[in-house]
Image (cartoon, helix red, strand yellow):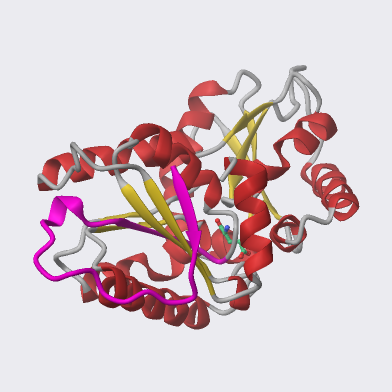
Amino acid sequence: MNGTFESARPADAAGRATSRRPIGVFDSGVGGLSILRELRRELPKEEFVYFSDGGHAPYGERADAFVAERSRAITRRLLDEHRIKALVVACNTATTAALHLLRAEHGQLPFVGVEPALKPAASATRTGRIAVFATRGTLASARFRALHDAMRGPAEFVLQPCDGLAAAIENDREAEIRDLCGRYARLAGEFGSAPGRIDTVVLGCTHYPFAMRVLQDVLGPDVRIVETGEPVARQARRLLDVHGISNGEGAARVTFLTSGPERTLREAAQRWLGL
Ligand code: DGL
């Protein structure tokens, strides 16, 4: 697996079969690497172009219009310069703010979005109490509200916005990560497997899996933490198959692009993906 860093790349040679083209993946920053990690496992013969919008991160505390505009610009760039065959929006906040617009604008392009895994959490909980850690933008969105409304029933969801946590993870500020995880856990309530406690936590932001160790430490060993990387990767595989554009013979490769500091993305890719 190669990893290369570029700030721009010329268009692929015309005529490359769709199945041989790369899959685009983007996030506000390095969080989408938690999705890319699973995509590479599930689709080892596919080529990926990862775009980190680190120059405009975090998205979670921004207006929807801003996130939608960035998502549209990134999608156009990945299409124009890299001729992507599919796009994974590896960001919950961008999925809620922009996926419907991207689909409307690029009807031919297969898209995969990410959203907090409420359903798997509802199946996993024993106490019936689940916390959802996500950005303010995701939790306030109409898309999340619809998902939440559809899941109301025996399980109770405690919605906890985690301002600043994605930024702390983006910049690898360990003490702040620990501090914020502790603070948001306290705000959400009491955790554990005893009746009435929260026994399941949904990570509704793709940055948060990179704080998994700290979170598990803070929440205790009895708490199950649910993330979305694996189901998203499986969904991407299904989508490629349905469209008949899987690459059966490619060599795995990731091209990394960023609008922010190259070093942040490079170090995160090394730390978390071994690239
Ligand atoms: N990683 C993103 C998400 O899944 C956004 C984090 C942020 O930029 O605030 O929501």
- Left or right of residue 117, residue 248 in this image: left
Q: Where does the image place residue 243, in percent across and percent down from the top left?
A: 12, 48
Q: Is residue 20 visible?
A: yes
In the rendered image of this protein, does residue 196 appear above or below residue 234?
above
- Residue at figure coordinates x 9%, y 66% from the top left: 15
- Residue at figure coordinates x 83%, y 56% from the top left: 173
Question: What number of labels is visible?
Answer: 0
- Residue at figure coordinates x 20%, y 45% from the top left: 240
Q: Where does the image place residue 275, in percent across and percent down from the top left?
A: 56, 46
Q: Where does the image place residue 27, in percent across and percent down from the top left?
A: 51, 62
Front residue of 196/58: it is 58
Q: Is residue 117 magenta?
A: no
Q: Is residue 135 visible?
A: no
Quadrant the N terminus occupies = top left
- Left or right of residue 210, residue 41 in this image: left
In the rendered image of this protein, does residue 109 appear above or below residue 248?
below
In the rendered image of this protein, does residue 75 appear above or below residue 225?
below
Occupied quadrant, residue 143? bottom left
Occupied quadrant, residue 186? top right
Question: Which residues are the magenta region?
Answer: 1-28
Front residue of 175/202: it is 175
Q: Is residue 12 magenta?
A: yes
- Residue at figure coordinates x 15%, y 50% from the top left: 19
> Where ligand 1 lies, by quadrant?
bottom right
